[in-house]
Image (cartoon, coloured by chain):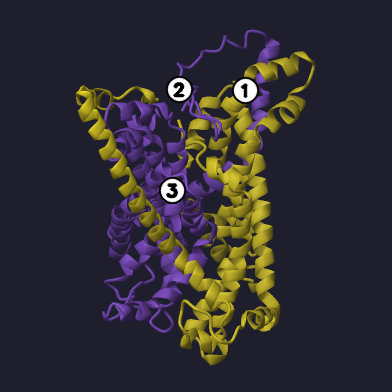
Chain colours: A yellow, B purple
């Protein structure tokens, strides 16, 4: 909490500069106004440059999705070709390899939602348990979970693969979904949030009114946790949607791949392969279609993630 | 991280830390003690998953790493041999050095971009500012694989725009995928992908500072730069520590971007480019699961130790105790 202690360097130093005569102060003020005006323009320019840097690859993808293969190689990379081929490309996604692309997209949805929702439910329950009950062993268990946030999940992929293959669930959707339920960071966020957002007094009152523990949780605590729930859900859905290493390791059946692994496979084939396997236009259009759902959800859920992503970091 | 970890609801201003309020001692009555056991019920579903997919795989990997299996002799116990082999294996050591180099370059790059953007956004309340905040964040909504695919197109000499852009300034187009440039190309992809997310975290922390402090600083004659460097940055140090920790853990397990870029840059990125790629190729191309387990387990422990040391060194800034 040292953050809130007034810092000596901040408090003491500027004091020496204020004790000027009024005229000096006035000059200071006008200087400052001028400088502020200059800085504003500088700031705006800086933001525009940054925004261009972050957006131009996306713009490139939008444009590329509307080109056929010859357009991709032949025309200006940042502007549309004469021939608008987006719908041909989308039709191509339906016919190439029997429309497997849409299957991949559907798989991504299933994995992301099953894994993300499951992880969120587990995190809400555990966060509430850690925040509002004082059971024996709580501190030790929570410390272990907090420490595990620092264990890189990719280091677990190979042992998880070996374990799952022993149980024979390798190469099934469960091989991706079950490990995705693990979100120690989600538990940490939910615990920290629950601690402050759910007053003990309210829980006591509910109990005195005769509500059981489950009812207290569902009717009193849960509604108060909504912002944190949306955040944890967003983080874990995005995490599973993004996942590459795990499905790459545990899935070999082409019909089960998520869109990320599938598109990477097409790229590898197109780079290595003969003319017939080069589907550059389908890769660009497929990439474009696959990023739409998440981009749109982030646009519509702005209210939530803009504050919510910082939960746990503000102390 | 005990009872004093106060956290404000996201939008609300941060509540100044008050001394942890000790609750009246509980568990006096039998009934009360029984009630507290409900806590176990709430945490047990997570603990089950935690045990199955984190604790157990870790122990399993460690167990596997103590054996060696060859066609001639079958599987036999070899103790720490795999670890001795790993830490004298130039491929593994080079990979470790490489991700360490990535951490040294990539984390400051992301942090500087995120911090600069957040500080500028914090001083502006224009439509341009909120639009650019959204645009800078946009890459976070794109899966890492797709982001890396996009950049691999952009880097590609065949249809990349590099030639167009460098023709404009009359320079020869550099090869972004040569062995000496691919490092910078990867740094660029990661910076592009993650800076926006870190910016949002830092920006939210900045917004939670009480504006009265800026007023006081202005009366004291502090200019914008001084306010930023002497007040804002120190006050958000806990968020910065969190961002660096995430970036550190992410960088040391670098995998997806180099794997995707390898599609078009096989000469510059070999199969053991990062420790994770090495473990993957040992396991899935060479079926050396025992040795791959030793590599994966070593990497896991090194990352854990690294981030632990980092959090320990910065415990003052982060408020973690």
Given residues A217 and B134, the one toward you in this image is B134
Q: Chain of mark 2?
A: B
Q: Which residue is mark 3?
A: B198
Residue mark closest to the camera, 3 vs 1: 3
The answer to whether tags 3 and 1 share a subunit is no
Within 10 angstroms of label 3, few (less than 14), some, or many (20 or more) residues?
many
Rounded to the nearest whole Å, what is the CA distance between mark 1 and mark 2? Answer: 25 Å
Location of residue A181 in the rendering, given as x and y in whole percent from the top left corner: 62, 48
Q: Does any portion of residue A52 appear in the rendered image?
A: yes
Q: Is residue B61 left or right of A262 when viewed as pictured?
A: left
Chain-order first, disc 3 or disc 2:
2
Q: Which residue is mark 2?
A: B16
Q: Which residue is mark 1?
A: A133
Rounded to the nearest whole Å, what is the CA distance between mark 3 and mark 2? Answer: 24 Å
The quarter of the picture where the C terminus of chain A appears is: top left
The answer to whether tags 3 and 2 share a subunit is yes
Q: Residue furthest front?
A: A23
Q: Is residue B278 above or below residue B54?
A: below
| Labels 1 & 2 near each other (Cβ < 8 A) | no
The answer to whether tags 1 and 2 share a subunit is no
């Amino acid at each position: 909490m040292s953050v809130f202690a007034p810092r000596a360097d901040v408090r003491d130093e500027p004091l020496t500069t204020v004790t000027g005569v009024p005229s000096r102060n006035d000059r200071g003020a006008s200087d400052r106004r001028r400088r502020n005006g200059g800085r504003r323009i500088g700031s705006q320019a800086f933001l525009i440059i940054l925004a261009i840097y972050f957006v131009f690859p996306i713009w490139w993808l939008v444009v590329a999705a509307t080109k056929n293969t010859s357009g991709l190689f032949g025309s200006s990379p940042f502007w549309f070709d004469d021939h608008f081929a987006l719908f041909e490309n989308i039709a191509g996604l339906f016919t190439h390899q029997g429309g497997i692309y849409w299957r991949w997209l559907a798989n991504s949805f299933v994995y992301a939602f099953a894994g993300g929702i499951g992880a969120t439910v587990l995190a809400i329950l555990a966060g509430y348990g850690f925040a509002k009950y004082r059971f024996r062993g709580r501190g030790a268990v929570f410390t272990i979970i907090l420490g595990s946030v620092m264990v890189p999940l990719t280091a677990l992929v190979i042992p998880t693969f070996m374990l799952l293959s022993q149980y024979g669930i390798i190469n099934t959707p469960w091989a991706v979904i079950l490990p995705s339920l693990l979100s120690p960071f989600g538990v940490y966020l939910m615990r920290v949030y629950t601690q402050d957002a759910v007053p003990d007094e309210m829980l006591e009152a509910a109990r005195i009114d005769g509500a059981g523990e489950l009812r207290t949780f569902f009717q009193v605590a849960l509604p108060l946790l909504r912002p944190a729930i949306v955040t944890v859900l967003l983080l874990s859905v995005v995490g599973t949607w993004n996942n590459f290493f795990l499905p790459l390791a545990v899935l070999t059946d082409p019909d089960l791949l998520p869109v990320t692994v599938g598109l990477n496979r097409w790229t590898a084939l197109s780079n290595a392969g003969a003319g017939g396997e080069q589907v550059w236009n389908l890769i660009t259009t497929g990439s474009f279609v696959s990023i739409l759902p998440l981009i749109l959800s982030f646009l519509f859920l702005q209210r939530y993630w803009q504050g919510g992503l910082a939960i746990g970091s503000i102390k | 991280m005990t009872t004093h970890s106060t956290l404000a609801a996201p939008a609300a201003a941060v509540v100044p830390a008050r001394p942890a309020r000790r609750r009246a001692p509980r568990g006096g009555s039998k009934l009360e003690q029984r009630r507290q056991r409900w806590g176990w019920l709430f945490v047990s579903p997570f603990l089950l998953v935690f045990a199955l997919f984190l604790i157990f795989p870790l122990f399993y990997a460690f167990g596997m790493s103590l054996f060696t299996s060859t066609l001639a002799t079958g599987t036999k116990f070899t103790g720490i041999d795999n670890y001795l082999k790993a830490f004298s294996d130039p491929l593994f050591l080079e990979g470790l050095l490489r991700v360490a180099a990535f951490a040294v370059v990539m984390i400051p790059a992301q942090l500087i971009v995120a911090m600069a953007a957040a500080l500028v956004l914090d001083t502006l309340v224009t439509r341009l500012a909120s639009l650019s905040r959204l645009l800078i964040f946009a890459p976070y909504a794109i899966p890492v694989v797709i982001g890396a695919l996009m950049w691999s197109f952009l880097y590609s000499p065949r249809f990349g725009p590099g030639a167009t852009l460098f023709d404009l300034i009359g320079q020869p187009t550099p090869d972004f995928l040569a062995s000496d440039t691919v490092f910078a190309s990867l740094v660029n992809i990661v910076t592009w992908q993650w800076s926006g997310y870190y910016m949002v975290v830092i920006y939210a922390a900045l917004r939670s500072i009480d504006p009265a402090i800026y007023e006081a600083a202005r009366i004291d004659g502090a200019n914008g730069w001084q306010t930023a460097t002497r007040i804002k940055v120190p006050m958000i140090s806990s968020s910065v520590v969190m961002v660096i920790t995430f970036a550190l853990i992410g960088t040391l397990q670098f995998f997806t971007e180099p794997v995707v870029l390898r599609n078009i840059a096989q000469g510059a990125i070999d199969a053991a480019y990062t420790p994770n790629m090495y473990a993957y190729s040992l396991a899935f191309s060479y079926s050396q699961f025992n040795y791959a387990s030793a590599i994966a387990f070593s990497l896991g422990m090194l990352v854990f130790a690294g981030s632990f040391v980092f959090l320990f060194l910065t415990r003052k800034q982060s408020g973690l105790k």
